[in-house]
Structure formats: C-alpha cells, structure tokens
Image (tube, coloured by chain):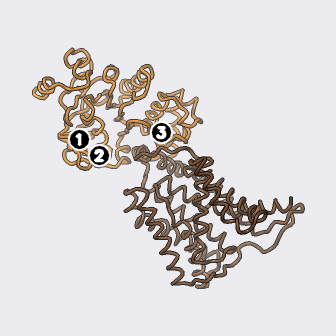
Amino acid sequence: MPEPVLEFTDVVAGYGALTILNGFSAEIAAGRVTTLIGANGAGKSTVFKTLFGLAEMRAGEIRLDGEPVGGLAPRALLARGVAYVPQGRNLFPTLSVEENLELGGVTLAAAVRRARMARVLERFPRLAERRAQQASTLSGGEQKTLEIGRALLGEPRVLLVDEPSIGLSPKLAREVFATLRGLADAGGVTVLMVEQNVKSGLAASHRAIALEGGRAVLEAPADAILAHPRIRSVFLGGHVAQTVSGRAAGGA
Amino acid sequence: MADLVQLLVSGCATGAVYALAAMGFVLLWQTSGTINFAQGEFVMLPAFAMLAGLALGLPLPLAFLASLVVAALVLGAAFKRVVVDPLVRAGVLPLVVATLGLSLAAKHAVRVGFSAEAQPFPQIFPEGVWNVLGVRVSAADVGTLLVAGALLAALHLFITRTLFGRSMQACAQNPDAARVLGIDVAGMILATFVINALLAACAALLVTPVWFARFDMGEAIGLKAFFAAIIGGFNQMRGALLGGILLGVLENLAAAYLSAQYKDGVALALFVLVILFRPEGLLGRAEERKV
C-alpha cells in the first residue's frame, strides 16, 4: 500500500450533544480512490465535516503528510491542498458556470486563477460550452461536474467528495465516478469519497473503509469487498452484521 | 402631458431614494437573515451627524464624508456586532423586536438630546427649474435622480462585476458551500452591513434638504423602504429598485390626480395587493429557506 497522505487517529467528533465519530482511525493511501461505506448514521460524512470544521472535533488527531491539520480553517486546508465537495447542491444558482468556477479560486492570485479556470474548462468541454449559463440551468450531472471542477481549481492533492452520485441517473453517476478515478490514476490526486451507491462507487475505487457506529471496522481493497459474497451482502444490503464487524475489528 | 412628465421625474427621484434604502434592506436580509426595522433611523442618524459636523464648522462635503465614516462604524460594524450577532441565531423575530426597539430609542434620543423641531439643511442642488422641451423639471429632482441612479448602478456593478461582489452573492445563496471554498463568510456579511449603512447615509444626504432633519424623518423612509422591498421581491436587488421607483411615482401621481392625502396610502395599498396576490413580490422568487 502506498504511503498514507491523510491519517485519522482516534477521532471523536459530533454536533452539540451528539457524538458521531467515536474513535475513528484510518489511513488514506496517496493517489488512490478510497470510498467510505456504511449504514446511515455510521459517520461517513462526519469524517469530512470534522476535517473541514463543520463538525466539532473533541479528541484525536488528523494528520496530512504527518502534520496535524485538525481544527484548521477551510482556507488553510485549501492552501495545503485539500478540497471538499459536500453532499447536495453546492452551486450558487444565479451565478454563471464560469463565475461559480472562479469562486473555487478566491484564495488564489488572479493570474493563477484564470490559468486554472482555462484548464478546468478544457478538461470538461460540456462546462466550457455552457460557461455563460446560470448554474441552475445545468442538468444534475453537469452541476456535480461543475462542483468537482470548481474544487479542482485549488489543484488539490486530496479531494473529499460526499455522495457524488446522489440524484443522478446511473449513466451520469458512472461518468462522475470515472472522472474521479481519472483524477487519481492520471493526476495522482488522492480521492476520498462517501457513496451510498456502494456497488458502482466501489467499482471506481481502489480501496474501501467500512464504518460502523463512528469507527472504522474494515479496510480492504474495493474489488475484494465487491467479490466477497458475505461482505457484499452485508454492505450492499445496507446494514452491518455483527459477525463481519467483529471479525474485521479482531483482524485489524 | 408636460405635467405628467414632471410628476414622473420627481416621482422617480423620490423612488430612487426609497430604492437606496430598500436595497440595503434586501442586502441585509439576503446575507444574514436580518430584517432591520430601524432602517429609517439609519437614514435619520447620518442626517443629524451631518448637522453636527456643520455645527462644528465643517463644510457640507466634509460633514458628509465624516457621516459616512461614522455610519460605517456605528450603523454598520457596531450594529452587527452588538445587536445582530448575539440575536441572529435565535431566528428572525427577536431581531425584528430588537430593531424596532432600536428605532424607538434612536428617534427619542435625538428628540430629547437634540431637538423635536425640524432642522433646516443646506441644499445640495441648485434651486432652479429647467425647461426641457416644454417640460419644467426642477434641478433638485434631476440631481437626486442622477446621484441615486449612479449609486444604484455602482452598487449593481460592484455586486455583479467584481469577485468581491460575487463572493457576497455566494454567501447569500449558499453560505456553507462558500465557506468550504475558503470564502470569508463572516467578512462578507460585515461588508453588507457596512454597505447598507453607507447607502443609508447617501439617502440622508439626498432627502434631508427636501424633508428637513427631524427626529421622526426615518419613519416614512423606513416604512417605504420596507414596502418597496416587499413589493419588488424581498430576495431580489432588482425588486428593491422596481419597488422603490414604483412607489415614488405612484405616490406622486396619487397626490396630483387624487388628493395629497392619499399619497401615503398608496404604498400601503400596493403592499396589501402584492401580499394578497403575489406574496413573493413582483420580481421575487418563492423562497425555500433552510432551517
């Protein structure tokens, strides 16, 4: 396994009185696509929110290249090469495609921003065609592509993507997954994603980490999970059985 | 016909001033969920700040600049820190009550501390009346319309054509998404409060020569700004502009063709009609607000 770029150690985090992550530990391999899987409420999205300061981190440590980054402001994380595409709709609907893209680079110098915008538009020709259109007029797949394109403006080394396929047709979802896989394979970007659509999410991933009750209970190559009938039925079935989590925790 | 044109010009001039105040109203609502019922007093206070500057011997342009600075600090930054920040998390209503209280306090502080009488204010435009193709228009109306129009155009360009302005729009439309892109959301919200205070001070410079400085001068403009914003559409800057101009013009027409006593009823009547038949406002979008 390649060097971990991002390490979570015994992270405890939540919102107000609610604790969601309960000693979450994981190592995220550099230049790979890793998918977090698990039931609703297992804490998948909270992993991202904790890193970006949208959930409170109460204990533990998050390291990027060995440096602690827990509690850093989004601006500082972006400067260190971490970008985040949250779940749901993240565009500014009345602004144009180009203006949305530009806002992914507010922290950059104007010349750098312009050069990178040109590169992103070149990479996603469909966005380039619609550059002057209001973002709200794009299809769901195009909107997700624009969100990912906007995150790429910071030229991140680590890209966090929460539920990229939500609301998309299977075909559009596959396109989005292929884009993410391409970023890792061709660009060396570390992609960490949360995906409810486990089967197609894993098909585009190198590795998977399963969460249960706010902890990582299993870490394995994605194809092993897809191929293993019992694990498959457990995770694709949507709930985590005691046997699997017990065995995995014992083996870890 | 000439009369009508004259009424339209002066109606647009008044309406443009309403639009200045309404625009600030809409900005505060969009970026921070604040409904400021002291908006009228945000116009009245800079008028008295200018009077104070004049009393100290400053020429009007300097007194105006000083009032801009004071407005930005007190009605912009301090208002946000002291009144809005502690209350805004509790929802819309506590802030409505707080700003109503602020409005009363400001009015009566000026009445007791300064004067209950209307204070004369220097004219900023020449007194004359121009004859353009047989239509008599007052220089003050044309001047007011030009200055207010230029301010509104500048604001529009700032918000749509600069990265800073578009970042402000981003914070209004989706603050969480803006935050993870590294946009300084708190800074952008502060900027809208400062812009609102500056617009109000500019409105003060334009209306006070006509209305005179009086502790309760804000009542009319605050109410009209609120009505203008609702009529045009509370979530649209263009709506505030349309609402303001529409009110100014209709008031003037009502005063001329019906009776001057109906003038102030026009805003209320239009407001009620809009609330009944098009509650999102003439240009507004139905709002989905996240809880």
Mark closer to the chain start, 1 or 2: 1
Amino acid at pointer 2: Ala
Q: Nearer the viewer, mark 1 or mark 2?
A: 1
Q: In this view, which residue lies farthest toward the left?
A: A250
Q: Chain of mark 2?
A: A
- Residue drawn 48% across the image and 69% down it: B73
Q: Chain of mark 3?
A: A
Mark closer to the chain start, 3 or 1: 1
Circle 3 residues within 10 Å: few <14, some 14–19, many ≥20: many
Q: Is residue B85 left or right of residue B150?
A: left
Q: Chain of mark 1?
A: A
Amino acid at pointer 3: Leu
Report the disc number at residue A42: none
Q: Which residue is mark 2?
A: A55
Tag 1 and tag 2, C-beta contact below 8 Å: yes
Q: Nearer the viewer, mark 3 or mark 1?
A: 1
Image hue for chain A? orange
B63 up-or-down from A64: above or below: below
Q: Quadrant of residue B142?
A: bottom right
Quadrant where the image shows the N terminus of chain A: top left
